């Protein structure tokens, strides 16, 4: 299956996909406006819309308000949120989140379980599918109505074969995630790196709908990124592009899970920062490492040092990629004052940068661990030829 973005000018999509994508990105539209936007005849759009309505993928919403006043009928159509649902499984270093969403990302039900790194991965995935079955049963979700599952996980992923190759802080071995889940649930499964999934969500539901070149930076338990070029996620030839946490920050530095030394993540991840804070604050580290982190001058000095290291490395990345914006996500950027300090540190290396270059994602709260939906839509529904 091809991996394609939404840039209609550059990507040849089937007429059907073009209409679905347009409705996803722009919301309800009349058939006439659809025809004008995608460059099809009104007759073709009417025909395709009839087919999509018969399948239940789109619905009619009634007349557009302004047209009513003009005395002309203009019926709006939109993607049917209740067409099917998608199971989103977000595996993070400490917690695994499970959610069932409708086609527009509304969470129908959800649960979570600790990410258990101590047990055999196959057993852990059996625990996940058991939780999914329970969630379906409790909430009356019929499996036949679930289009499929999307699993998002840190680290490198072989998306084609549904394998997590190395999730660094969780498991370092290769794990056939899709086959474990498919065996138990019997539905299609797509597996994607968590940051690429986030970027795909930006493309379909966020800033990526209007901006074609973006860099998404996540700073939390790990440091990760994703590159969107011309509306598509840049994968790299080994699917390992944008692993910025593993850029070498210090020569002959700390050992990293990726088997190299001195990686950025070994200095600036929350785990690494907590360890350094521990040497100063001992057992009180958790009372310091919270939303008022910068109120403590000693802690603030330590973090500013990390912010500087991150900002310097990001400046080098930006030099290469020249994106329109950098989207900041992750726990560290949620700490009060952190974004401002990061931008200030960045400006030391790039004084001419515009004030609106760095943006906080507008999706962070609304998508709530359901990045898998965009991955699934991209793979299965919106970009089929
Ligand atoms: Zn590394």
Image: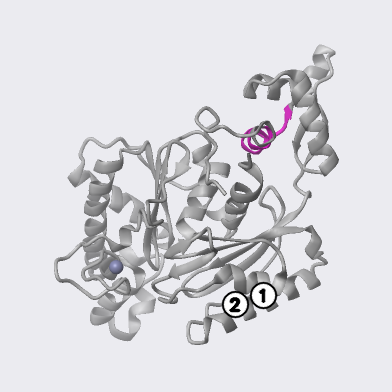
Q: Quadrant of the C terminus?
A: top right
Q: Is residue 20 above or below residue 202?
A: above
Prevailing SS of the magenta stretch: helix
Is residue 296 in sight in this rendering? no
Number of labels in the image equals 2
Q: Which residue is mark 1?
A: 129
Q: Which residue is mark 2?
A: 125
Q: Secondary structure at mark 2?
A: helix
Q: Residue at x 22, y 35 (%)?
A: 352
Figure quadrant, ligand 1: bottom left
State which region is magenta: 19-29
Q: Position of residue 187 (x, y in %)?
A: 71, 64
Instruction: Judge left or right: residue 211 versus residue 322.
Output: right
User: Does label 2 point to a residue whose CB lies under 8 Å from ligand 1?
Assistant: no
**Residue 118 marker:** none
Closer to the camera, 191 or 112? 191
Closer to the camera, 95 or 175? 175
Instruction: Let me know if residue 346 is in the magenta part.
Output: no
């Amino acid at each position: 299956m091809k991996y394609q973005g939404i840039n209609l000018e550059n990507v040849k999509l089937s007429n059907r996909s073009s209409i679905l994508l347009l409705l996803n990105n722009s919301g309800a539209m009349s058939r006439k406006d659809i025809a004008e936007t995608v460059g099809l005849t009104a007759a073709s759009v009417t025909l395709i819309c009839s087919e999509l309505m018969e399948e239940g993928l789109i619905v009619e919403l009634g007349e557009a308000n302004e047209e009513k006043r003009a005395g002309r009928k203009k019926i709006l159509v939109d993607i049917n949120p209740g067409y099917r649902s998608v199971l989103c499984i977000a595996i993070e270093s400490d917690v695994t989140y499970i959610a069932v969403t409708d086609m527009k990302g509304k969470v129908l039900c959800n649960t979570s379980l600790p990410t258990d790194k101590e047990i055999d991965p196959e057993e852990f995935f059996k625990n996940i599918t058991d939780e999914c079955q329970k969630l379906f049963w409790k909430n009356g979700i019929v499996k036949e109505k679930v289009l499929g599952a999307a699993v998002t996980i840190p680290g490198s992923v072989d998306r084609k074969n549904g394998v997590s190759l190395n999730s660094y802080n969780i498991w370092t071995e290769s794990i056939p995630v899709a086959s474990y889940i498919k065996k138990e649930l019997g539905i299609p499964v797509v597996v994607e790196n968590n940051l690429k999934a986030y970027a795909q969500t930006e493309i379909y539901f966020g800033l990526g709908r209007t901006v074609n070149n973006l860099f998404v930076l996540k700073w939390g338990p790990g440091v990760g990124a994703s590159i969107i070029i011309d509306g598509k996620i840049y994968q790299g030839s080994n699917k390992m592009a944008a692993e910025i946490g593993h850029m070498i920050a210090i020569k002959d530095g700390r050992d990293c899970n990726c088997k190299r030394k001195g990686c950025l993540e070994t200095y600036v991840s929350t785990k690494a920062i907590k360890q350094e804070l521990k040497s100063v604050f001992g057992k009180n580290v958790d009372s310091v490492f919270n939303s008022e982190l910068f109120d403590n001058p000693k802690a603030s000095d330590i973090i500013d040092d990390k912010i500087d290291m991150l900002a310097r490395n990001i400046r080098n990345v930006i030099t290469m990629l020249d994106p329109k914006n950098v989207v900041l996500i992750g726990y560290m950027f949620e700490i009060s004052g952190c974004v401002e300090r990061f931008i200030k540190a960045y400006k030391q290396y790039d004084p001419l940068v515009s004030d609106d270059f760095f943006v906080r994602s507008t999706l962070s709260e609304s998508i709530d661990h359901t990045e898998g939906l965009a991955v699934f839509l991209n793979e299965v529904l919106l970009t089929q030829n």
